[in-house]
Amino acid sequence: MDAKDVAADLDRVIVTADEIAVKTAELAAQIDADYAGREVLLVGVLNGAVMVMSDLSRAMRSRLKMDWMAVSSYGAGTKSSGVVRILKDLTIDVLDKHVLIVEDIVDTGLTLSYLVDNLKGRGAASVEVAAMFRKPAALTTVVNVKYIGFDIPNDFVVGYGLDFNGHYRNLRDVAVLGKHMYS
Ligand code: 5GP
């Protein structure tokens, strides 16, 4: 769906589907160059990173593997709980692998910081992070996000995999959800 299909629910579009496509190609080229000669394991964080993973992996020319983790996230609200729980673990052993965590959005960085430590603890040869969106709070976290798509304002956004109560993941653009939808 496009933003116009749910216009009444949204405040404003901040990143269009076309802008995401251009940025994805840039990130893919950069990642390909950085991992030249090394096989990378892309670890997508369910459910939000499904779109990023799908587009980024296909834009890459490298030989790669993909796996998925699910961790607890915002639930029904719009604020980070700070609690990270593994709901679904990897099926591939990360020992000695070059892991690139693929995330939709970094806000407080709590989720990522947990994941990076967790995967390093399992003996990955390297662990880096690619995130399509980053909020201002992420700039003060300890997590180093090597590949970033867009820095966005500190608003609750939906689209391109990002949901509110399970909806809007299939929105092609990324938009700020209208406050009237949750207050
Ligand atoms: P963090 O642990 O960095 O605070 O939060 C990361 C997770 O929170 C993301 O993977 C995403 O699931 C969720 N999240 C953070 N900000 C937003 C937002 O603006 N919209 C949506 N839908 N989810 C968000």
Image: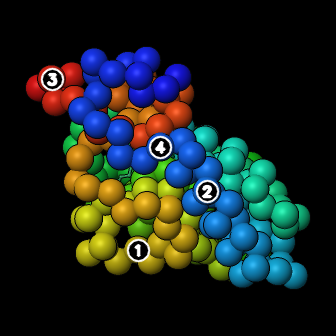
Which sits earlier in the primary sequence, circle 4 or circle 3?
Answer: 4
**Secondary structure under badge 2?**
helix
Residue 10 location (% of width, % of height): 29, 28
Q: Give the Cα separation between the discs numbered 4 and 3.
A: 22 Å
In the depicted structure, whether residue 26 falls above or below residue 7: below
In the depicted structure, whether residue 180 falls above or below residue 71: above
Residue 165 location (% of width, % of height): 35, 24
How crowded is the residue under tag 3: few (<14 C-alpha within 10 Å), some, or many (20+)?
few
Which sits earlier in the primary sequence, circle 1 or circle 3?
Answer: 1
How crowded is the residue under tag 1: few (<14 C-alpha within 10 Å), some, or many (20+)?
many
Which sits earlier in the primary sequence, circle 2 or circle 1?
Answer: 2
- For the residues labelled 2 and 1, say whether their Cβ atoms are less than 8 Å apart: no
Disc 3 Cβ-to-ligand 1 distance below 8 Å = no
Kindly indicate the quadrant of the structure image that contains residue 159.
Answer: top left
Give the residue at x 23% y 54%. 154
Q: Which residue is mark 4?
A: 16
Q: Amino acid at mark 4?
A: Thr
**Secondary structure under badge 4?**
loop
How crowded is the residue under tag 4: few (<14 C-alpha within 10 Å), some, or many (20+)?
some
- For the residues labelled 4 and 1, say whether their Cβ atoms are less than 8 Å apart: no
> Residue 180 shows which numbered tag?
3
Which label lies toward us, 3 or 2? 2
Q: Which residue is mark 1?
A: 143
Q: Nearer the viewer, residue 67 or 63?
A: 63
**Secondary structure under badge 3?**
helix
Q: Give the Cα separation between the discs numbered 1 and 3.
A: 33 Å
Give the residue at x 60% y 41%. 51
Disc 4 Cβ-to-ligand 1 distance below 8 Å = no
> Residue 22 shows which numbered tag?
2
